[in-house]
Image (cartoon, rainbow, N blue to C red):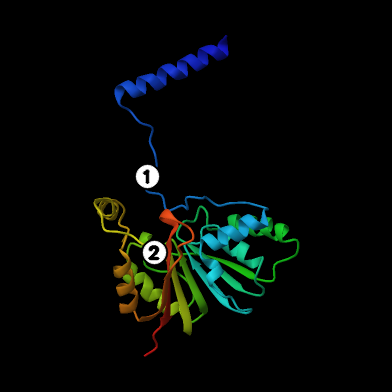
Amino acid sequence: MRATRKVLLCLYLLASLIILGCQPTVETHSMQPTEGYPFTKDIDEIKDLLKSKCLDTISFESGEVIADIGAGNGYIEAMLAMFNDSLTFYIQDIDTSVCNESEVAKVFKFYEEVNGKPFTSKFLTVNGSDTDTNLPDDTFDKILMLWTYSYLKEPVKFINDIKENLKDDGLFYVINPGIEETDYTKSLREETGWNVSILEKQIDDIINCGFNLVRIARNYNEGNYNEPVIMIFRKNNY
């Protein structure tokens, strides 16, 4: 009887909200990945996730130093460490609630157990700001930016900092879906301060910061929103 009364009370409150035109508060402008931060022991699922991020298109060589901008808790790097040896990963993100030593350690411990043997790669955690990566200069063979560029509030300042972080022959990988200029993207820009740049604007800004566009391709295998554009830039040292 008591349980029934609770259910009826909940239904009454819900009906009242509908009548009054009230809606629950929903976070609409999150920078967190739509798939969350997965913990999976399924090897095929792990491979599919890396492929969906287009990371199957990138070759990693033993001894390389890699940074991932907007890496969250580093689950991508933990997955990559299962298939690549002796890399140094810098897990970089502005969000300290997910990008911190404790959270990152949990992720790597989980995937090391899935791997069945110790990782040979190293992992470092770095928190950046809207204008500064806080990464060391002249250090990186590759810097990745996966589904992150649109969230940059001051992309020119940030990309100039990335240029300083790369080695002279370093590569900068920008992977994200193409964006069209619409009323919605304009409103996002105004409400959040994110750049939400169309593809041509992204390319122009990066080239103007001192990069050469080496390659551009699109992954047509994912479909719909997840048809990311893969852009590879090389630091211009002239």
Residue 168 place in picture, x, y as percent: 46, 86
Q: Which residue is mark 2?
A: 149
Residue 226 placement (x, y as % from top left): 44, 57
Nearer to the camera, 154 or 4: 4
Q: Which residue is mark 1?
A: 28
Left or right: residue 215 compared with residue 113: left
- Binning the other alpha carbons within 10 Å of mark 1 as few (below 14), some (14 to 19) or many (20 upward) gives few
Looking at the image, residue 81 lies above or below residue 62: above
Task: Provide residue 220's location: percent of width, then percent of height.
Answer: 45, 62
Corner quadrant of residue 19: top left
**Residue occupying the point 61% across, 79% down:** 61
Q: Secondary structure at mark 2?
A: helix
Quarter of the rendering containing residue 223: bottom left
Q: Amino acid at mark 2?
A: Tyr
Query: Closer to the camera, 17 or 203?
Result: 203
**Mark closer to the chain start, 1 or 2:** 1
In the displayed structure, 36 sits above or below 199; it is above
Q: Position of residue 153 (x, y in %)?
A: 33, 62
Instruction: Say which amino acid is labelled 1.
Output: Thr
Label 1 element class: loop
Residue 174 visible in this rendered orientation of the protein = yes
Instruction: Tell me how far mark 1 sits from mark 2, CA to CA.
Output: 18 Å
Q: Quadrant of residue 80?
A: bottom right
The answer to whether mark 1 and mark 2 are in CB contact below 8 A is no
Which of 15/97 is in front? 15
Q: Residue at 28% across / 54% down in the picture?
A: 185
